[in-house]
Structure formats: C-alpha cells, structure tokens
Amino acid sequence: MTRTTAVSSDIDSRDVPAPVRRKDVAVLVPAAGMGLRLGGGTPKALRELAGEPLLVHACRRLALAPSVAMIVIAAPPGDVDAVRALVPGAVVVPGGATRQQSVAAALAVVPESIEVVLVHDAARALTPPELVEAVAAAVRSGAAAVVPALPVVDTIKRVDAGEHVLETVDRAPLRVIQTPQGFPRDTLVRAHAEAVDEHTDDAGMVERLGHKVHCVPGSDLALKITRPLDLLIAESLLAAHPLPES
Ligand SMILES: Nc1ccn([C@@H]2O[C@H](COP(=O)(O)OP(=O)(O)OP(=O)(O)O)[C@@H](O)[C@H]2O)c(=O)n1
Ligand SMILES: C[C@](O)(CO)[C@H](O)COP(=O)(O)O
C-alpha cells in the first residue's frame, strides 16, 4: 500500500521566497596558540586528531557552512607556509602573542565588503556547520554580538587564595561560552580598536563597549580541546559524529 501525505495550505508556493543563501561571512580562526595545557611541544592547532591537524578539522566544518565566504587563519608565526599548504583556500596571517592579538591580525585583512565576521577557535575543531549558521543568522537579525552558550553542569564555589570556600554561587544564570562568536564587522573593528586590556573572548570586548551580547544554544561538539583528556573525548565525538560523505 502506498502511503500518501496530504498537505493543504492556502499559501500559493509562488508567494514563498526561496531561503536566502548568503555567502556574506568571514570567519577568523585564531590558531597561533602553543597549547601549553595540552602539552606535546607542537602548536595545538597542528596537533593531530585521527591523523589530521585540529585546524584542518575545524576549517573543513567552517567551509561546509553555506554562509562562509572566507576563512582567515592566524597561524603560529613559524608555521605560516605549512598552514597555507594545509588549508589552501584560506587567507593565512602570522598570529600574535595573545589570542586577542591573533584575532586583530586576522581582522585587519578582512575586506570592507564583508559585513558579518565570526571568530572561531581552531581548538574547537569539531564545531558543526549548523552552529556557524545559527550564529551568522543571529548577527543578520541585528545582534551586536552573538555567542554560543551552554548551561553550567557542576556546582560552582568561589574560593580565597588559600583554597577555602567563600561561597557557593547560584549557577542558574551562569553559562559556559563557546565559539564561533559573531559580530557585524564594524562593531568588532571598533571593539578591537578601543580595547584597553586583554580579554579572553571577543564578545567581552563588545560587551565593554556597552552592547548587549546575545546567546544561542551551544553544542557539545564545540568543546575546546584544552587538556589531554579533551583529545580523548574529541576522538570519541569524531567517531560518533563523522561528517556526511561528500
Ligand atoms: N597567541 C595566541 C593564543 C591563542 N590563540 C588561539 O586561541 C584559541 C583559544 O586558545 P586556547 O585554546 O587557550 O589555546 P592556547 O593558548 O594554545 O592554549 P594554552 O593556554 O594551553 O597554551 C586557540 O585556537 C589558539 O590557537 C592564538 O591564535 N594566538
Ligand atoms: C574564546 C573562548 O573560547 C570562549 O570560551 C575562550 O575564552 C578562550 O579562552 P582561552 O583562555 O584562550 O582558552
């Protein structure tokens, strides 16, 4: 028996605009960190996961996001040519001494015609293209800054210098923040130009300008590979969530 599904609608399909596929996003990929907490002596973005550098995993997923027009990588200064060979479609610049300086170096080469800029850690190598699209869409909808956020799952306590607990913090309003973080280009340029101190993320700089930062749901796949345990977790995640065959 053939099963049919009746779809009734009084909207003429000719009235429905086709989904807009805009390639209007530049993604800056800070990848110049040493990865001291991971160890191993190789810059972290070049450390391998299942036989390929973390940076390659990260850029492959970025390139699968329909909005992405260009990828700019801030590479370890001694590995610029190696990174160009690994990710041939990307623009590669030497990174700086801090994450913030690496992002600024990449931002400096984004053409003015690009209106939406995302910043994405190479260390979040398994971030799915869907999260990139969700962040880009929220920027297009008018947000000054967009961050993926996850709830905190552990009890949080504040301690003093001697590791004595001062208080147990209410975790309900706390969030763990990931990348990609998204911005209108002009806002990110201004945030970097006016930053007076070091920030751990770009949204923090935009927040300092007085703008509201908008959260979208984060992803477990966007974990930051920071310590050796994270590499083991990433191996399992990669096996469980391979990219579809092209
Ligand atoms: N001078 C720096 C420092 C960090 N990063 C990048 O910023 C991202 C997030 O940083 P983190 O995961 O903390 O990397 P590292 O700084 O390499 O780690 P660690 O602090 O353990 O050395 C990474 O993709 C890293 O390569 C960068 O581009 N330039
Ligand atoms: C930008 C970031 O990934 C957001 O969670 C994070 O702040 C980077 O921090 P790190 O101290 O450089 O690991």
Image (tube, helix red, strand yellow):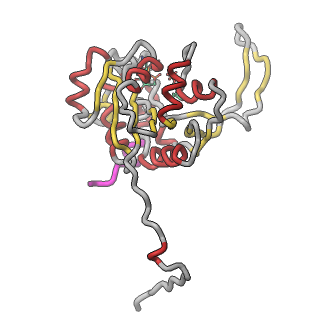
Instruction: Give the percent coordinates (x, y) of residue 145.
Output: 57, 36
Name the quadrant where ligand 1 sits. Answer: top left
Q: Is residue 239 magenta?
A: yes
Q: Position of residue 59 (x, y in %)?
A: 33, 37
Asked whether 179 or 219 is in front, the reply is: 179
- The answer to if 108 sits in the magenta stretch is no
Task: Name which residue lies at 50% across and 32% down.
Answer: 186
Q: Residue at x 37, y 20 (%)?
A: 32
Q: Quadrant of residue 200?
A: top right
x then y, percent, for residue 98 = 45, 15
Instruction: Identify whether 160 is placed above or below 32.
Output: above
Q: Residue at x 47, y 31 (%)?
A: 224
Q: Is residue 100 above or below residue 143?
A: above
Quarter of the image with the N terminus is bottom left
Image location (x, y in percent) of residue 142: 57, 45
Q: What span is in magenta?
A: 235-246
- Residue nearest the viewer, comparing 71 with 226: 71
The C terminus appears in which quarter of the rendering?
bottom left
Could you tell whether 231 is left or right of 134 in the image?
left
| Residue 162: quadrant of the picture | top right
